Amino acid sequence: MRVFSTLLLGLMLVLAVACARTPERGGYRPAPGPGANPQLGDSAPHDWGGRHPYAHAVHGIDVSRWQGDIDWNRVRNAGISFAFIKATEGGDHYDPSFHRYWREAAEARIPRGAYHYYYFCRSGAEQAAWFIRQVPREIGSLPPVIDLEWTNSRTCPYRPSPQEIKQQASIFMDIVGRHYGQRPIIYTTVDFYRDNRLGDMRAEFWLRSVANHPSVPYPGQRWAFWQYTGTGIVPGIRGNTDLNAFAGTRADWVRWLQTRLTR
């Protein structure tokens, strides 16, 4: 079983690299032009100035039920190297498209992970148990993600203190991390990060910044992923979708996968 698991993990890494490459005579390297692949676009393009997301080699998506039917093979062929899929919210809600997307992304050989939308009126332990109940522990999956952001929830207008938020989020991350063998990534927004001083949390960060390079609104904060638009255009997905960049080079991406895929 250990040999099989090792072979499967190795195959996932090879496929991840293949998904992140565009063929060219004499070898493989990123295609020229805007973005890591010219098939990616934006319905509301932004003038980034000097530090733009298209300088990054590895790009991915995050999706939920609102994307509808997805042609995952077209998504892969467009140059998408990873996908984060909404799985759960709070302690009793799950995304009805999660299990289908989870299966179809794997069939298309796109490395994928699941994310949980945090709800401030349930404990971190309750929400961790709900996430674990819905998301399978599978070899080759990306690390879980906890989505921390302010909401306009009608069922939970409560806004905890920074101390409570970080305490409960850490409980969630500890429980989920033990179960999947990988500590969760924190996704957050500029205002939530600032209001709750999240920079002192022990985690990798996935940062939303649609107006500037993350170094501007999150000074000094290291990050693994950057969500740079909510109006991305990807072949295989109808309408707009979120686009994200990985922080490093293609070689960095392969090294990151070697340490962060579920084993």
Image (cartoon, rainbow, N blue to C red):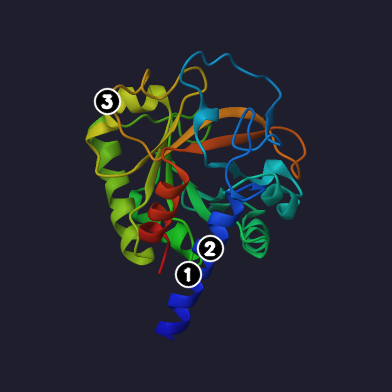
Mark 2 nearby-residue class (10 Å; few <14, some 14–19, many ≥20): few
Give percent across and percent down for residue 195.
32, 23
Q: Outermost residue toward the bottom?
A: 1
**Which residue bears the numbered disc 1?**
10
Do the residues under discs 3 and 1 have CB atoms within 8 angstroms? no
Q: Which amino acid type corresponds to the residue marked 2 in the rendered image? A: Val
Q: What separation in Å lies between label 1 and label 2 (alpha carbons)?
A: 6 Å
Instruction: Tell me the number on the disc at residue 220.
Output: 3
Q: Nearer the viewer, residue 251 or 177?
A: 251
Residue at 71%, 24% (x, y): give it.
Answer: 43
17 or 69, which lies in front?
A: 17
Q: CA distance from mark 3 to mark 1?
A: 34 Å
Q: Amino acid at mark 3?
A: Gly
Query: Position of 44 compared to 258: left or right?
Result: right
Amino acid tagged 1: Gly
Circle 1 crowding by C-alpha within 10 Å: few under 14, some 14–19, many from 20: some
Question: Label 2, on which residue?
Answer: 14
Between marks 3 and 2 in the image, the one whose residue lies nearer the viewer: 2
Residue contact at pointers 1 and 2, CB within 8 angstroms:
yes
Q: Earlier in the sequence, mark 3 or mark 1?
A: 1
